[in-house]
Image: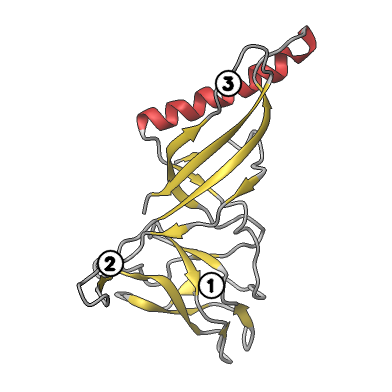
């Protein structure tokens, strides 16, 4: 799968937000809430200032690189290209990590995942960590600190829950953010926002909207 071109680093971003539950307000004001069980997150990243027009020969190479990068992104947007990308604010590992973590047992569903292969008696992940699970596309967030037993086993509390029919295989690999940025989203571009460009403008800022594609 294509990796998102990291020619430029974002100057700011929003944290990924999940698809919200459905809310239908009633006359009483209490309303009804329904969990859709939907996977997928949305976030934005800002880039800039980026040189898009060279006013002298020395800047031509820089401007060409920016316009080439934007052309690639616009082709992704137009064609619905799916790529892998680490989120700039979810690159750290808060727990100790270590070992070779694996799914322990097939046919697991729901918000708990039994795992093994970690170091013994260690807080390997902490609430707020994110992981990839081999064979599944979503990025999962750890909801509670995970401390292994004397055999390197621990049950992870995850969001979103693993849906029926999407269980990871026994011994599927678990990817953590070690080294930093190892956990990646499978995503596409939903929108590219560029400011109006007036005559004489050399630099612009760009905001990209990403949608996880689980």
Considering depth in this image, is 130 or 19 the residue closer to the camera? 19
Q: Is residue 186 above or below residue 135?
A: above
Residue beneath disc 2 = 23
Q: Residue at x 44, y 49 (%)?
A: 186
Residue 108 horizontal/vertical position (percent): 33, 76
The residue that disc 3 covers is 68
Residue 127 can be seen, yes or no: yes
CA separation in Å, label 2 and label 1: 38 Å
- Residue positioned 61% across, 73% down in the render: 99
Mark nearer the N terminus (2 vs 3)? 2
From this view, report whether residue 123 is shown above or below residue 4.
Answer: below
Looking at the image, residue 163 lies above or below residue 120: above
Q: CA distance from mark 3 to mark 1?
A: 40 Å
Distance Cα–Cα, label 2 vs label 3 = 43 Å
Q: Does the image show residue 4?
A: no
Asked if labels 3 and 2 touch by Cβ distance under 8 angstroms, the answer is no
- Residue 143 location, x and y as percent? 50, 77
* Between discs 3 and 1, the one toward the N terminus: 3
Quadrant housing residue 36: bottom left
């Amino acid at each position: 799968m294509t990796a998102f071109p990291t020619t430029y680093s974002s100057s700011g971003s929003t944290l990924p937000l999940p698809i919200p539950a459905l809310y239908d307000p009633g006359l009483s004001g209490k309303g009804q809430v329904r969990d859709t069980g939907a996977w997928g997150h949305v976030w934005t990243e800002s880039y800039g200032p980026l040189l898009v027009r060279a006013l002298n020969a020395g800047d031509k190479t820089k401007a060409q690189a920016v316009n080439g990068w934007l052309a690639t992104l616009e082709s992704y947007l137009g064609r619905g290209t799916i790529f892998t990308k680490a989120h700039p604010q979810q690159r750290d590992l808060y727990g100790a990590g270590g070992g070779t973590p694996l799914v322990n047992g097939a046919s697991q569903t729901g918000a708990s995942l039994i795992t093994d292969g970690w170091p013994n008696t260690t807080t390997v992940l902490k609430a707020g960590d994110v992981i990839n699970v081999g064979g599944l596309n979503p990025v999962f967030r750890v909801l509670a600190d995970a401390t292994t037993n004397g055999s390197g086993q621990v049950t992870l509390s995850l969001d979103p829950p693993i849906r029926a029919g999407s269980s990871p295989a026994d011994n599927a690999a678990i990817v953590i953010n070690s080294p930093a940025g190892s956990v990646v989203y499978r995503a596409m571009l939903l929108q590219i926002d560029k400011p109006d460009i007036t005559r004489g403008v050399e630099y612009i800022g760009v905001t990209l909207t990403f949608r996880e594609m689980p």
